[in-house]
Amino acid sequence: MLDTPPAVAVRPAAPPVPDAPGLRVRGLRVRYEAAGPWALDGVDLDLPPGRRVAVVGPSGSGKSTLAAVLFRFRDPDAGQVLLDGVDVTTQEPDAVRARVTGMPQDPHVFDSTVRENLRLARPDASDADLWAVLARVRLADAVRAAGGLDAATGAHGARLSGGMRQRLALARALLAGTPQRPSPLLVLDEPTAHLDPGTRDAVLADLLAATADRSLVLVTHDLTGLDRMDDIVVLVRGQVAQRGTHAELHARPGWYRTAYETATRAAIQHSQHRHSDRLTMSGSAGAGQ
Ligand SMILES: Nc1ncnc2c1ncn2[C@@H]1O[C@H](COP(=O)(O)OP(=O)(O)OP(=O)(O)O)[C@@H](O)[C@H]1O
Ligand SMILES: [Mg+2]
């Protein structure tokens, strides 16, 4: 006797889908004024643990707005930001900031000393820890010259140059958390903006080495060295215009390739210019012509 197959069946329960670890941004929209233009207009981003993404794009395209949402300085007007599957708006800002650290584009330096500015990020850091992180951001010599860890920073860091302020903030970002539990996601908004190209490259290399096991969102205007990132997202007018690796984005027409080539040409002209200056100064330029 043949059994008629049942019309419906109860399938065994699917194993629970573990929430995607890391950062997930879905349909993120943000604007600064009701009915104003969208600063972010439907951004999606995935950053599994330990991966690094660069966020680039023209000025005003929404990069710092994205960073502000990740730091939980602003809430999404639409869409979601999930950390290990949990919507950040369901958590206390301080709880989010224990896991997401970094530096905003215009970092605040407190009117205190170098030591106290750094210890904000890790109150139990020893002086040796502080010197180590200062060396990492290439600030140790300048701090030593200014009088050491007790050097006064001045109101809003007025006693420091723009580059020193930036590097102090970067050092603070690298210190955040404890040595055993550094914050898993680091968000850096233009960490190398005030540095000269040589230092910039060295700081980026050190930064990547220092954060090898942490997730990184690197907002930057500087398109050199991005082949070291896992992924690059190009924001244009609040939307993701392109995404891929450096090699992928460089291989196709678009904002990234144009901007990269413009920057590379400028860098070559700059170094040729310096080279010819040197030749002229040494008296050998044009010799024998
Ligand atoms: N506090 C604010 N109030 C009103 N509008 C803002 C504010 N901050 C940013 N905007 C606007 O939101 C848009 C995105 O700005 P955002 O600072 O995120 O861009 P960005 O990509 O970081 O630019 P840049 O490369 O110059 O740092 C711009 O149109 C900007 O004018
Ligand atoms: Mg910005």
Image (cartoon, rainbow, N blue to C red):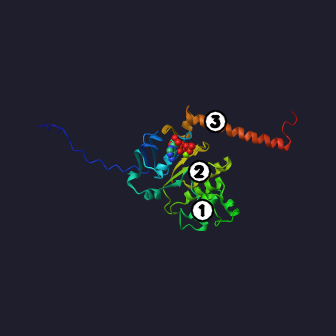
Q: Quadrant of residue 41?
A: top left
- Name the quadrant of the C terminus: top right
Q: Residues within 10 Å of mark 2 (few under 14, many from 20)?
A: many
Q: Earlier in the sequence, mark 1 or mark 2?
A: 1
Tell whether label 2 touches label 1 (CB within 8 Å).
no
Vertical relation: 289 (above or below) 280: above
Q: Marks 3 and 1, how far apart in space?
A: 39 Å
Q: Relative to the observer, which residue lies in front, 68 or 256?
A: 68
The relative height of residue 1 versus residue 96 in the rendered view (above or below) is above
Q: Look at mark 2 in the image and give the residue it sits on.
A: 191
Query: Disc 3 designates what residue?
Result: 262
Instruction: Determine the CA span between mark 3 and mark 2.
Output: 21 Å
How dense is the environment of label 3, judged by Cα within 10 Å: few (below 14), some, or many (20 and up)? few
Give me the residue at 43% from left, 58% from top. 95
Q: Nearer the viewer, residue 245 or 163?
A: 163
**Residue 163 in picture, x, y percent from top left:** 65, 53
Which of pointers 3 and 2 lies earlier in the amino acid sequence?
2
Residue nearest the viewer, comparing 179 with 189: 189
For residue 213, say whether it is visible: no
Q: Position of residue 193 (x, y in %)?
A: 62, 48
Question: Which residue lies under the disc numbered 1?
Answer: 111
Residue 5: mark in rendering = none
Residue drawn 83% across the image and 44% down it: 281
For image coordinates 72% across by 41% down, the residue present is: 271
Q: Position of residue 10 (x, y in %)?
A: 21, 44
Between the C-alphas of marks 1 and 2, the distance is 21 Å
Q: Is residue 261 visible?
A: yes
Residues at discs 3 and 2 in contact (Cβ within 8 Å): no
Task: Tell me the element at label 3.
Answer: helix
**Is the residue under label 1 in contact with that under label 3 (CB below 8 Å)?**
no
